[in-house]
Image (cartoon, rainbow, N blue to C red):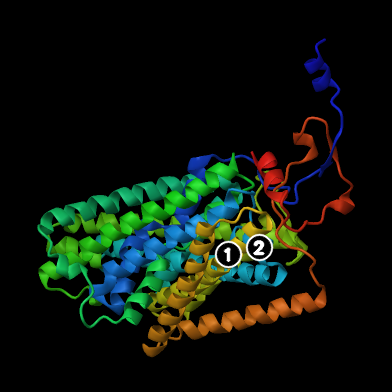
Amino acid sequence: MTALERAIRRPPPVRGFRATSPLDGLDRRSVGFFDVFAQSVSAVAPAAAATTVTLLVAGLSPTATVTSLLLGGVLIILVARTISQFARRFAAAGAVYTYTARGLGVRAGLAAGASAIIGYGAIAMFALLGGAFYSTLVLRSVWPSLPDAPLVAAGVLSAEATLLVLVLVRGIRLSSRVALVVEAASVTLIVGLLIALLTRIGPIDPAVLLPSADDSPVTVAAGALVALTAYVGFESAATLGVEARMPLRTVPRAIGWTAVVSAALYLLAAVAQVSGFAAIGGDFAASTSPVNDLADAFGLGGWGVVADLGIAASFLACAIGSTTALSRVLFTMARDRALPAPLGRTHRRFGTPIGAIACAVPVVIAAPLGLLLSGVALPTAMHLTLVVGGFGYIVSYALVCVAAPVFLHRIGELTGRAAVVAVACAVALVGTIAAFAIIDIGSGSIAVWVAAALALTAAAAIAWRLRRAPLSALGAYDEPVAGAVLGGAAEHSADLAPKSASPGEAGASRDGAG
């Protein structure tokens, strides 16, 4: 027997490892890059956002649409670089919540967690509403006498909800692959239609794509915040850090590629729609379904119905992706003891956070159904949930951008470029929130006030939680366990509390996350 064989058969004990990961119970290392990429892409829903969010941006100023989307794209790519500073160093299921907690501590971590919960939850509601809106358009194309009643939209939304529950409970491999197939087909349909439109439109006057003299910097900045809502969810690949294979490589790649691909698609959609309405002398902002209107105007009416079907499917994928991410954040906060322990329970067979799913899904379904059945118009309900979700996401992004340089400095890996990018992103995100709040309040919308009420409620809940039982540390992440290490010896369960970030944290996480 060689020395190597003896070492393998009777290895010396290696101490300092846990018997189980703090996030034990999830289906660890079960999905590859394309599944992780699908999570971010589905949460963003680029096929749906390319046609709906561009219209919302145009509602502020049609001539500033392309510029606002471009600014939003550049900002989100820089935010993606900042979030990847964490994703390259440790694997987690809490995404921006965990990252902020590791950088800024308990209070900021809870604030980021609350913001992420509001963001993921409200965008999941927006996606169900959007799916119902475009599904009813498809139904009316084959059944013109279908009544325009809230009960019809509510029925479609209920059918979507049933599919959502089935996919979420069955496991991340099923949900991510369903979302990937649906989103890939939807994007292919939308890109095909946009290219066909550009071919019919012909030469484009560059002047129609630039802001006019009437567009103030505040208007462009407010448009950029609405544009940012087209990208929200791009970071949700980070919620699969435990379930991904080689997460320190696959998660940052998925985050970065989602931001870049989405930005390219949105610019294509904005150019096609802005130039299309300019060519026919129409009002982009007044359209309720711009893709359909342009398809009819340029002799592509059949394409419009197909595109509506793709958009409806994309919204369903978005609901799946957003609720998947929401359940992982709730799960992680429960494992951190910030939320009730039952939310940290996992399904024995499927490895899904069933406790968090059981808590989140009824709310995600009931809220949009309640809006519809109470008589709120579908477009109004979509605007409300989108704005509230956008605020939740943007606040969490701003917090994680502040946390990044603090965390990197603590572990001795801060660079000047990383610090400048993170701080610039945080300032820009806060600025866009302020600009949009001014514009939206001025329009008479209640969305900002609803977002403010939720923020105050979250702040009160955080204060109550900390008074009831102080939390010493947050930010549980996936760690190497004794069973995965040759000669690994498990520590006693008393040592399982999360440790604060230290210079050795990054290295230990790298060693165990693959």
Q: What distance separates the C-alpha of mark 1 from that of mark 2?
A: 8 Å
Residue at (44% x, 46% y) in the render: 180
Residue at (22% x, 73% y) in the render: 284
What type is the residue that disc 1 sits on?
A: Val
Q: Which mark is residue 301?
A: none
Q: Secondary structure at mark 2?
A: helix
For the question of whether residue 245 can be seen, the reply is no
In this rendered view, identify the residue nearer to me: 92 or 164.
92
On screen, 256 above or below 279?
above
On screen, 246 above or below 142?
above
Residue at (40% x, 84% y) in the render: 440
Residue, disc 1: 400
Residue at (74% x, 67% y) in the render: 338
Q: Secondary structure at mark 1?
A: helix
What is the x, y in percent for residue 141? 25, 62
Q: Residues within 10 Å of mark 1 (few under 14, many from 20)?
A: many
What is the x, y in percent for residue 217? 32, 79
What type is the residue that disc 2 sits on?
A: Gly
Residue, disc 2: 103
For the question of whether residue 156 can be seen, the reply is yes
Q: Do the numbered discs 1 and 2 sit on residues whose CB atoms are within 8 Å?
A: yes
